[in-house]
Amino acid sequence: MGSHRGRGFVNAVLRRLAAEGEPCIKNASPDVIWSHPPELVKRWTSRFGKDRTAALMEWNNSVPPIGGVTPGNSSAVEYKGTAGRYVRDYTEFPRMGDLNQMDIPEGVYIQDEANVIVARMGALLGAGGRVLEVGAAPGGKTHHLAGKADSVVSVDRSFERMGLWKENRSRLGWEHCLPLVALGGELPFAGGFDLVFIDAPCTNTGVYRRRSDARWNWSEELLVQCSDLQRELLRKGAEAVADGGVLFYSTCSLEPEEDQDQVEWFESSFAGFDRIPLQGPEELVRDGLISIFPPECSIDGIFAAAWRRGL
Ligand SMILES: C[S@@+](CC[C@H](N)C(=O)[O-])C[C@H]1O[C@@H](n2cnc3c(N)ncnc32)[C@H](O)[C@@H]1O
């Protein structure tokens, strides 16, 4: 179609939509209105109910803020922006063109506040120790682990993503962090780490607001694949934890198969690990687990659990 005819066609469709849009939307199903896969909407509706599912889909379609913190617990750096919802020194920056055109202070890693919360919890549990990070690239969690740990081994299966991690290491000065491109399920470590932090690959259902295309990858098969891989990473990760050390597990999924069910599976499969109840405002924590429902907390949907290995 030539560009002139093409424009004419688009205009005709838009005129029709403008004229008929109201009844058209009224009759449409929620998956069409909010542009989500129908099978996922069905799954969420049976779990969350209609209204909470609609709120979640509306949230997923909203524009996320751009913000971050400097490493550690520092709030000493003062820069423009607005304070975060939960994290005192989280700063949101006004959007101006693309990220490269924005005036972002040196040392800031752009990420959602939910990531900061979970990464800092893990980092505090591994403070001063030897840390193994699995699923590390491009380094959003490393940024916080690096600020507290004595040393960090950061593992990811993706060579390309670890390239980004290395760029971030140069930019942010994580000299005591070593990159390792490897499969987390095949690591050779037996004990030795004070903290093993698994940021598991997952279906991403808690971060669709930031990864708007990811919803179209959703399938029950993907869920099963992710859940199997997460168990593999938990199994290997547990082996690498030193006596008295901590295993930390996080996902950016809202699905129980990747979150609470994995906790139950881990606890029924591995003796000698005691759950560490994670603390936080009541809307972020359920039964000592971080479990965030985005539209009710206004941050990304992240899940986290932690255990200490007995001495
Ligand atoms: C949630 S993302 C990590 C995000 C990162 N921690 C951050 O905060 O920037 C999960 C990562 O796991 C990696 N991954 C997937 N399968 C893996 C495996 N079998 N072993 C190690 N890493 C894997 C992916 O390449 C991806 O980078």
Image: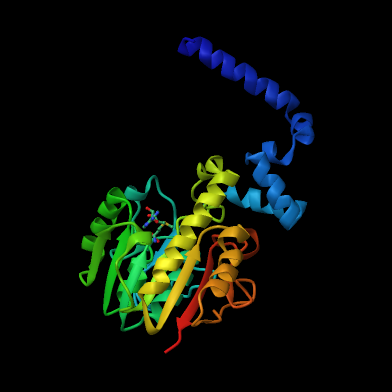
Is any atom of residue 212 visible in this view?
yes
In-image side of 193 versus 92 (left or right) = left
Give the residue drawn at x 30%, y 65%. 154
* Tally of numbered tags: 0
**Quadrant of the frame with the C terminus:** bottom left
Q: On the rendering, which quadrant does ligand 1 occupy?
A: bottom left
Give the residue drawn at x 32%, y 49%. 100
Give the residue drawn at x 56%, y 13%. 8
Q: Choose top left, top right, bottom left or bottom right for residue 29.
A: top right
Q: Is residue 157 above or below residue 73?
A: above
Residue 218, percent across and down?
A: 56, 44
Q: Which of 303 and 229 is in front in this view?
A: 229
Q: Is residue 298 above or below residue 28?
A: below
Is any atom of residue 254 visible in this view?
no
Q: Which of 138 and 191 is in front in this view?
A: 191
Q: Nearer the viewer, residue 122 or 181?
A: 181
Q: Choose top left, top right, bottom left or bottom right for residue 93.
A: bottom left
In-image side of 7 versus 42 (left or right) = left
Q: Which of 114 and 231 is in front in this view?
A: 231
Q: How is the rendered protein coloured?
A: rainbow
Q: Is residue 188 above or below residue 35?
A: below
Give the residue drawn at x 66%, y 21%. 15
In-image side of 238 versus 28 (left or right) = left
Furthest toward the bottom, the residue is 311
Residue 219, percent across and down?
A: 58, 43
Residue 165, percent across and down?
A: 28, 57
Residue 58, percent across and down?
A: 65, 49
